[in-house]
Each structure stands twice: as C-alpha cells, then as structure tokens.
Image (cartoon, rainbow, N blue to C red):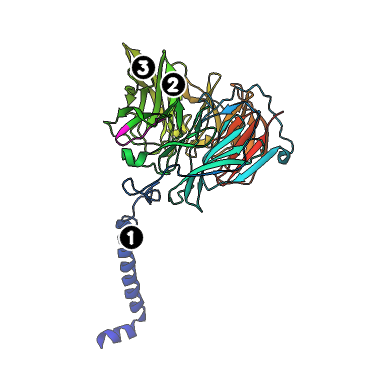
Amino acid sequence: MRLKQYFLDKPSAKYTILLTALTIICTVAFVWWLLNDPSQSFATNVPGMDKRNAVNTANNKVVKIGEHFTAFEAVKSTLTETWPRFRGENYDNISTSAIKLTDKFGDIKKRIRWSVELGEGHAGAAIYKGLVYVLDYDETKRADMLKCFSLVDGKESWRRWYDIAIKRNHGMSRTIPAISDKYILSIGPRCDVMCVDRQTGNFKWGLDVEKEYSTEVPLWYTGQCALLDDNKAIIATGGKALMIAIDCETGKKIWETPNPNKWKMSHSSIMPYTWKGKKMYVYSAVGGACGIAADGPDAGKVLWETKAWNHNVIAPSPVCMPDGKIFLTAGYGGGSMMLQLKEEGSGFSVKVLYEYLPKDGLACEQQTPLYYQGHLYGILPKDGGTLRNQLVCVDPSDTKKMIWSSGKTTRFGLGPYLISDNKMFILNDEGVLTIVKPGAGKFELLDEVKVFDAQDAWAPMAIADGYLVLRDSKKMYCVDLKK
C-alpha cells in the first residue's frame, strides 16, 4: 500500500523505474548480440559442397561407353582446314590459315550460316576438314552424345552416345574432343573416355577413369579436354595414377605415371611442350604442376614438378613459352605464377620466378591466356582490381606490368578468344563478338556486334576455312568471317 501511495504521490517515479528497467534489458540484449555471432553455426559455401556432381559414385555407376549410334545424312566436303582440338592445331589458340577475315561485321544476320540447339553446357567444338564435332549432354535421354555436323550448313551426320545420369551443375558438358585423321577422342562430364573411328563413328574403346583410377571428379564435372598425340590418348587421371597413355587403336595402356603426391584432376588440360629437344606433357593439377616425358625410354616419367602451385579450382591450362618459361594461372583468388625450366645434367629443374594475386598482374579465371608475337594476352577475373574483366597485354618477362588494357568501358567477362588473320576475336558473356588488333602499341578495337542473346557464353571457339564456331550455354552457331 505504501508503494502504491508513493507512485500516486510521485507519478514520475513510476516512469523513471520503467525506463531504467527497459534500459537494462536493452543493454543486456545488445551485449548478448555482440558476443554471439548468429552465423557461427553456418558452413562456408564453397563450390562443390552441395555434391551436385556426385550422382554416380566410382563404385556404383555402370556405363556402357559408346553403346548407341545413329547415322543421319552423309556429309561431303571439299574444305581442308582443321581446328582439331582444344586451342587449335598448335595448342596456342592461333590459326595459321591464310584466309583473309573481315574487320567489319556489317549485317551479322547474313554472316550466321546456321545454329543448332544443344544441351546445357560449355563444351566447345573441334573442326576437321568441313566437319564439326562436339560432345553434348542430352537431358531427355540422359546421355553423353558425341555429335558430327557439317561445317557449311549445320546438318547432323551422326551421333555416338552412351547412357549416364548426371544432374545439372551449372551446365553439364565442358570438354572439346580431339580429332586426328583416324580417331576421335572425347572425355565426358564424369571422366568417361571414348575413342571412335573418325570417318565412320564406329566405337573402338572406352575407359571409365573415375572407376578404374578412383578419380575424384572435379567440382564442375570434367573440364580437361581430350589430348590425342601420335595415336596415343593422354589422360591426366589423378587418383591411382597421375597421367596415362593409351594406344588409340587397341585401347591398351602404354605407360602410367605414379601419383605418390596424390594430386587430383583439375579442370585444366594437358599441354604438349618441347624444350631443349625434349618433348613433355605439362599439367596443372590440384596439388602442383609437372612435366611428364612424352616419348623415348623415359616416357611417362616425371621430368620436373613443383608443389608451390596448389589451388583447388584450376581451369586455365599452362602457357609454355619458347624460353622455358611456363605461366600458370587460376581463378577464385588463385592468381598467377611464372616458372622457369632449367637443364640439369640429363634432367630438368624448375624455379618459381614470382607469384602474385589477381589484382597485381595478368591472371585468368576460366580461359587460358594467349602467347602471340612475344606478348601474353588475357582477360582479368572479377577479382582483378580496377582492371577486372578487361583484356590486357603484358610482357612475359614481367606479367605484373601491363602494357595496355581495353579500358573500363570495354570489359569481356569470362568469354573465349582466339587469333586468326592477325585479328583477335573475343566473345563476351552476353554474346557480343569483338574484333581487336593485337599488338604491343595500344588497345585497338576494330568492330563489335551482338551475335546472339546469351548468358554464360564461355565455351572455347574454333575456326577453320573462315568459319567461326561458337556457342552459349544452350545453342551453337557458325559465323562466316571471310572478308
């Protein structure tokens, strides 16, 4: 009663006590909020954590590689040029064709010869004497399909496929087949290797790399493009072996490189390289980089290796230069590293010249930089600082110093690029094709045009006989670039 009378005599005291209590409660709540991170139980979201590419395990999947075949219309062609594999005839993304190409597009609709629908993916094409080969994934049939089209009109000649169930993982197919006069070699999203006869499409042999070598499939399925060299299939398996060679005619293993470091398969592709008269296969694995002897009595043996280069996501392939320098780069903050090979007795040693973050010099996330006339060209990733997504030109003696860039108003994203007729053709993410004059003087844009409405137009391009084959995530186009 006395407390009630006190509040009646002094009504402001009641509000003072209530305000004090409320202040104490708010203060306690604020301190609790500061000391207790609401996200402390969250797991870091990194590529591949959702295991979307783990539909089939190495022990459970049963794939009858090459079991299906359909023939359509036979293609006769008088065309002679080839772009027979990832990065072209000489593994450098440079065409040596003498055909003169346009530097002004004009009406692009008149230049588009044909287009075909494909399954969602980023697999580029290979071209061999008027025929276009692409490894597609058919979501309806749930199958990897190696398809053959006419370069001139886009008519399908045949397809060879096999059933394999995979889920969408930002696209499915990502690799380019390798073509020789006798064979076609492909690697599917789940590391299934298929070899067929080039002229007929007849199946020769298949290899389930994931099952046979306990290979860990990369985060976004297989990105390693097939390498067919001197009638041998060269595959960087990871798992039980680092690299293997298989006779394309018989399917029998020729050699196998041990993998004591337990390096894993990356999205990068193997690059053949001859230096000081010694041919080798250079590979940027998850765990390190290496050079494997390609021929002679030591074929399959490790010539050199470095564990200094170690990143979880590596898509660009090594760029091997005439003076023994090897440029390595990777996305997702991986940056770049320059190696220098050196002869030591009958073998080789390797030295790290320098390394840096993507904001500090030339680095690429997805496409492989291009070495042309003594300079390196590439498109910086989104974490490339103020030059992000710009085309840059650098001197290989110091890739941290930019000679020129395309400028803040001319950015290209993750799209591909190649050189033909001393012109660089660049496709950006949205389907805009740009012609640039390469050179050490300055960035010189010749023309640009919107070829198609697209997102994620990332697949490497191919060019032969003046026809450029390119695609977005769901459709492939052929553009006539002849002058």
Q: Secondary structure at mark 3?
A: loop
Alpha-carbon span between mark 3 and mark 2: 15 Å
354 or 282, which lies in front? 282
Q: Secondary structure at mark 1?
A: helix
Taken as a whole, is the magenta stretch helix, strand or loop?
loop
Q: Earlier in the sequence, mark 1 or mark 3?
A: 1
Q: Earlier in the sequence, mark 2 or mark 1?
A: 1
| Residue 303 among magenta residues | no
* Percent position of residue 163, x then y: 44, 48
Is residue 66 left or right of 211 when viewed as pictured? right
Label 2 with label 1: CB-CB less than 8 Å? no
Q: Residue 129's quadrant in the figure?
A: top right
Q: Amino acid at mark 3?
A: Gly
Q: Amino acid at mark 1?
A: Trp
The residues colored magenta run: 234-241
404 or 285, which lies in front? 285
**Which of the labelled discs sits on residue 296, or is there none?**
3
Q: Is residue 365 above or below residue 273?
A: below
Is residue 107 left or right of 383 when viewed as pictured? right
Crowding near the residue tagged with mark 2, few <14, some 14–19, many ≥20 C-alpha atoms within 10 Å? many
390 or 462, which lies in front? 462
Residue name at image x 68 percent, y 32 percent? 481
* Quadrant occupied by the C terminus: top right
Q: Is residue 232 above or below residue 120?
A: above
Q: Which residue is mark 1?
A: 33
The answer, for residue 409, to whether it is visible in the render is: no
